[in-house]
C-alpha cells in the first residue's frame, strides 16, 4: 500500500449496480494508484472495467464503497462529488474531438478560464509534448488516427488533471499502430508525470502501458499486480487462464525441506523454496500451470509429444502438443524448427515458478 502522501486514487470495496439487473456490474472492487503510476483494467467484454472507470469519473452512481482522489472523498455514504469538480481528464474511445475546431483550439477547449497568454503557452507545451508542433492549424479530418489520438490526449492533459482516465483509447486503430502508440503514449504520460488509469481488452496494450494491471471478471477484480506476477504468479485460475498461453496439467506436489518437489507426466522438477501461503500453493494432488515458455523443445528428451496444431508467430511457432497419455501442453519453439503436423518431438519442462490450483478435469489449452 502506498504512503498517504503518494496516493492519487484509492477505491475501496466499490459496488455499482444498474437498475433492473440482479448482479453488481462492479462488485467489491478495491485498488489504488500512486503518483505518476499507470494502471490498466483488462478483462472480457461486460466484465465491469468501463463501468468502474466511469464510476471513478463520477459518471455512474455508486451503490456502496468509497472513491478517494488525492485523499478527498469523491463517493461514499451520502457523498457524491460532481464529475466536473473531480479534476479528472478523460480520453474516450472515439476521441470526441470537435470537427469545427483546429488542433490548437481543440486542445485549448478546457482552458477557457485561463488568461489568453497562459492558454497559448500551455497549448504550445502540449503540442511539443505529443509531437504535433507542425499540425496545430489542421482540423481533425485532416489528421491520421494516431494524430487524432494525440490531440485527444493533449486536450485531456491541458487543464493539468490530477488523474487521467482512458477508455479503450486505441481500439479504433490498426493492430500495428496500437502497440506502437501505446508505448509512445506511456512515454508522454511518464514525461508529464501523469497518473493514469486505462481500460483495454488487449493484453499487449496492457503490458506495454501498465505499471500495474487489474484482471476483472463479472464485476470482480481478481488480481491487481504487475505484468510479471500476473503471468508467472497468478493468484486465481481465471487470471492464469486469461493472461498468456498455457495449460493446467495434473501434478502431485510435496515439500522436502526447502525443496518444492513436483511430479507430472513430463517428469519431476524442483523449485528451491517452500510454497508461499499467499499464492495458495497446494500440497498433494493438484493442477499446475504450465506456460508455453515452460516447455522446451529438446530432441534428446525422453518425453515425446505429437504436434496437433501449430501457429506461426514470425520468430517462433506456438505448438499445441499431445502426450502419449492424451494430456495437452503448449510450447513456443523458434521458427527454424518447422516440424510437420502429426510429427513427434522431444520436450521437457523447465519451470521456474510452480503455481498450483485445485484439481479439476483437464481443460482445453489456454488461448
Image: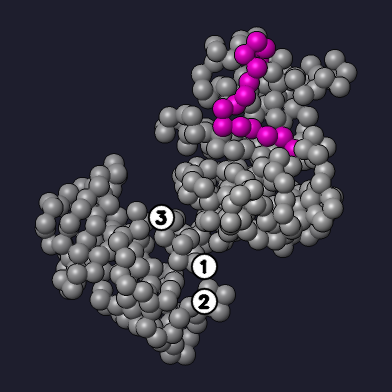
Contact, mark 1 vs mark 2 (Cβ under 8 Å): yes
Predominant secondary structure, magenta span? loop
**x, y (%) of residue 261?**
38, 83
Earlier in the chain: of badge 3 and badge 2, it is 3
231 relative to 323 in the view: left or right: right
For residue 113, side relative to residue 254 (left or right): right
Q: Residue at x 24, y 57 (%)?
A: 320
From the viewer's perspective, is residue 36 above or below residue 291? above
**Residue most toward the front?**
20
How far, Cα to Cα, is label 3 from label 2? 20 Å
Q: Residue at x 13, y 62 (%)?
A: 344
Check whether the beta carbons of the residues at disc 3 and disc 2 lie within 8 A of each other: no
In the picture of the structure, the residue carrying the numbered disc 1 is 235
Nearer to me, 154 or 332:
154
Q: Earlier in the sequence, mark 3 or mark 1?
A: 1
Q: Earlier in the sequence, mark 1 or mark 2?
A: 1
Q: Nearer the viewer, residue 316 or 318?
A: 318
323 relative to 61, above or below:
below
Residue under the point 41% across and 60% down: 241
- Magenta part of the protein: which range? 88-103
Q: Residues within 10 Å of mark 3 (few under 14, many from 20)?
A: some
Relative horizontal placement of residue 91, taking residue 303 as reference (left or right): right
State the SS at label 2. Answer: loop
In the picture, measured across the screen, residue 323 lies left or right of residue 48, that is left
Q: Is residue 150 visible?
A: no
Q: Residue 280 shows which numbered tag?
A: 2
Mark carried by residue 244: 3
Name the spot of residue 142 as percent of width and height, x first. Answer: 54, 11
- Residue drawn at x 38%, y 77% is 359
Q: Does the magenta-highlighted stretch encompass residue 100?
A: yes
Q: Are marks 3 and 1 in contact (CB under 8 Å)?
A: no
Amino acid at each position: 500500500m502506498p504512503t498517504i502522501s503518494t496516493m492519487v486514487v484509492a477505491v475501496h470495496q466499490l459496488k455499482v449496480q444498474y437498475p433492473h439487473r440482479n448482479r453488481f456490474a462492479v462488485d467489491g472492487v478495491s485498488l489504488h494508484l500512486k503518483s505518476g503510476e499507470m494502471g490498466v483494467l483488462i478483462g472480457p467484454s461486460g466484465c465491469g472495467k468501463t463501468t468502474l472507470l466511469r464510476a471513478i469519473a463520477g459518471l455512474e452512481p455508486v451503490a456502496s464503497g468509497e472513491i478517494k482522489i488525492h485523499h478527498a472523498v469523491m463517493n461514499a455514504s451520502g457523498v457524491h462529488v460532481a464529475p466536473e469538480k473531480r479534476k479528472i481528464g478523460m480520453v474516450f474511445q472515439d476521441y470526441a474531438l470537435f470537427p469545427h475546431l483546429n488542433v490548437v483550439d481543440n486542445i485549448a477547449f478546457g482552458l477557457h478560464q485561463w488568461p489568453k497568454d497562459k492558454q497559448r503557452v500551455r497549448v504550445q507545451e502540449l503540442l511539443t509534448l505529443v509531437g504535433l508542433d507542425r499540425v496545430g492549424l489542421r482540423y481533425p479530418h485532416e489528421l491520421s488516427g494516431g494524430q487524432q489520438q494525440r490531440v485527444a490526449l493533449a486536450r485531456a492533459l491541458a487543464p493539468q488533471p490530477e488523474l487521467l482516465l482512458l477508455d479503450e483509447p486505441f481500439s479504433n486503430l490498426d493492430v500495428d499502430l496500437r502497440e506502437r502508440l501505446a508505448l509512445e503514449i506511456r512515454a508522454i504520460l511518464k514525461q508529464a508525470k501523469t497518473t493514469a488509469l486505462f481500460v483495454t481488452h488487449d493484453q499487449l496494450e496492457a503490458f506495454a502501458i501498465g505499471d500495474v494491471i487489474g484482471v476483472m471478471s463479472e464485476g470482480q477484480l481478481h488480481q491487481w499486480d504487475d505484468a510479471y506476477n500476473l503471468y508467472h504468479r497468478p493468484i486465481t485460475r481465471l487470471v492464469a487462464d486469461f493472461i498468456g498461453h498455457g495449460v493446467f496439467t495434473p501434478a502431485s506436489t510435496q515439500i522436502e525441506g526447502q525443496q518444492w518437489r513436483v511430479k507430472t507426466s513430463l517428469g519431476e522438477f524442483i523449485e528451491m523454496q517452500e510454497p508461499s501461503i499467499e499464492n495458495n500453493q497446494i500440497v498433494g494432488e493438484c493442477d499446475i500451470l504450465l506456460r508455453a515458455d515452460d516447455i522446451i523443445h529438446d530432441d534428446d528428451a525422453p518425453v515425446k509429444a505429437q504436434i496437433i496444431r501449430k501457429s506461426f508467430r514470425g520468430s517462433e511457432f506456438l505448438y499445441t502438443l499431445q502426450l502419449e497419455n492424451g494430456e495437452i501442453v503448449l510450447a513456443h519453439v523458434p521458427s527454424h524448427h518447422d516440424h510437420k503436423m502429426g510429427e513427434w518431438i522431444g520436450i521437457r519442462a523447465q519451470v521456474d515458478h510452480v503455481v498450483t490450483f485445485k484439481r479439476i478435469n483437464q481443460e482445453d489449452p489456454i488461448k
